Image (cartoon, grey):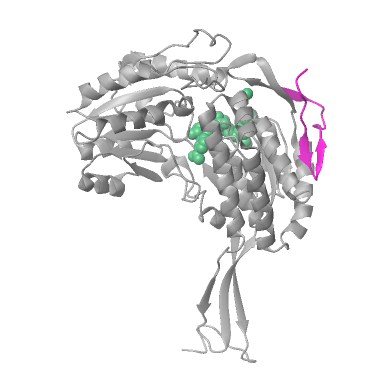
Amino acid sequence: MPQKFQNFINGKWVDAKSGRTFENRNPANWDEVVGIFPKSGKEDVDEAVKAARAAFEKWRLMPAPKRGDIMRKVGDLLVAHKEELAREMTREMGKVLLETRGDVQEGIDTAYYASSEGRRLFGHTVPSELPNKFAMAIRVPIGVAGIITPWNFPMAIPTWKIFPAILSGNTVVFKPATDTPKTATTLIEILMEAGIPEGVVNIVHGGGSEVGNAITSHPDVDLISFTGSTLVGKQISKSSSDTLKRVSLELGGKNAQIVMDDADLDLALDGVLWGAFGTTGQRCTATSRLILHEKIYDKFMTMLVDRTKKLRLGDGLLQSTDVGPCVNESQRKTVASYVEIGQQEGATLVAGGADANGDGLSKGWFYQPTIFSDVKPTMRIAKEEIFGPVLSVIRAKDVEESIRILNDTIYGLSSSIYTRDVNKAFVAIRDIKAGITYVNVPTIGAEAHLPFGGVKQTGNGHREGGWTVYDFFTEWKAVYVDYSGKLQRAQIDNY
Ligand code: NAP
Ligand code: MG
């Protein structure tokens, strides 16, 4: 019998009020049920928001360094459970152990960063224009934060949001993706074990249109932090606007790696293989386009196709596996449909292009690592996010044209250029329109203490990670203290 899990509301594990449930399956072996989870609705969200609102009044008053002490314990517990968490994550969403370990490590890094931020949360003091008057701006918590996350980083992304939210003094209602409820549940258990008081963090499992929408339109939720597709991000932008919430949207990408004719080609090859096929291409920062200088195009394509055909598909729990499955059936169908589109558009299929059904693969949502060459920048496979193991290769004549092609999408998350020419590297840093630019590094590999996010339709201008996420989860309050003992009028009495 598969294990049954519950929501966590106001410090108690509870079923959905409706009693409904959903299953979560292992994408590498769909016969294996990871667990049964509550299929919640608006009535469960209402309870969670009520609990979070009540808890906020106490939690906001705990000194931030004390909240930081709890975050340190959270980090220690994540370290202690790292291996077990990584295995559980691979079972529920398929990426290989090496990567799920990295996913947990990002949570650890974020916890320790938050812990130390408890002793900073810097504000500003500035001089007043009037004598005997003191002026400062301080950060204050905002209230109840609704947190909605995707399945591709089941630990890292929730921690990027929840840890700074609570360190800043807010309380949380968390809806994880329906494909990764188990990792989210373990995260809640760890937060409780570390000593987070009841009501401060609540989890409500269930679908986007029911639970997600109930959170984003709830009048008593002050903030929404969302990571997911651009399509859903636009819906959330609308559903949260009636109550004028502060909303952070981290959305899709169509990231490209440029390889110049002077690049170290072996290094660029390792980079693109990791960027395109790591996490089975299911990263917001995945390398979905490769832009090759025409002088090295043929040589590099031969190297790339050869190495891609050697990638080993399989269960991510096996040491021998390079590439795991797609997360679910519908994701694999999306990939297959884009491969069809690519062929109809006239691109040349040079690797993959079909489901993978070999030994040990027949009960998983596996798709062969796929490459299209001769892709034109105007084709749909060059413009739209596919979110699977498909790489579109485009030819360019110089750095300027490469950057023009790279920028020619509605997205702007990550980008990469391989070159040994420092002048070209700096032109790329200046002219690429993206939130992240890597030089001689693939499009994936963000570190937890730097700003993370994108431009254009990848988001709405906020940044996660590092110090920047604290700007989202706190409100500025300007404070004036006049100790002159008389009425002093700004802009008037001095001039
Ligand atoms: P998704 O379909 O947009 O779902 C993301 C989350 O939103 C899930 O928890 C989903 O619930 C929920 N949701 C769906 N409809 C909703 C609605 N109407 N109101 C509120 N919540 C709703 O994305 P995904 O397939 O999980 O993840 C892949 C996407 O995320 C890709 O586009 C990828 O680029 C993007 N992503 C972006 C970043 C970044 O930082 N920029 C990072 C990672 C991923 P269900 O699980 O129930 O559907
Ligand atoms: Mg699953």
**Residue lying at 50% horizontally and 55% vertically, measured from the top left:** 468
- Quadrant housing residue 470: bottom right
**Residue lying at 67% horizontally and 39% vertically, measured from the top left:** 187
Of 78 and 149, nearer the camera is: 78
Image coordinates for residue 196, horizontal then vertical, percent: 74, 50
Image coordinates for residue 135, horizontal then vertical, percent: 56, 78
Q: Is residue 346 left or right of residue 83?
A: left
Image coordinates for residue 311, horizontal then vertical, percent: 41, 18
Q: Which residues are magenta?
A: 1-22
Assess whether residue 18 is covered by the magenta stretch. Answer: yes
Q: Is residue 244 visible?
A: no
Is residue 8 shown above or below 306? below
Q: Is residue 280 left or right of residue 349?
A: right
Q: Is residue 22 visible?
A: yes
Of 239 and 129, nearer the camera is: 129
- Quadrant housing residue 190: top right
Mark count: 0
Is residue 490 shown above or below 65? below
Of 388 and 368, nearer the camera is: 368
Q: For the N terminus, give its image quadrant.
A: top right
Q: Is residue 423 left or right of residue 216?
A: left
**Residue lying at 58% horizontally and 58% vertically, measured from the top left:** 116
Is residue 21 shown above or below 211? above
Ligand 1 image-quadrant field: top right
**Residue lying at 49% horizontally and 20% vertically, measured from the top left:** 321
Image coordinates for residue 103, horizontal then vertical, percent: 55, 37
Q: Main secondary structure of the magenta part?
A: loop
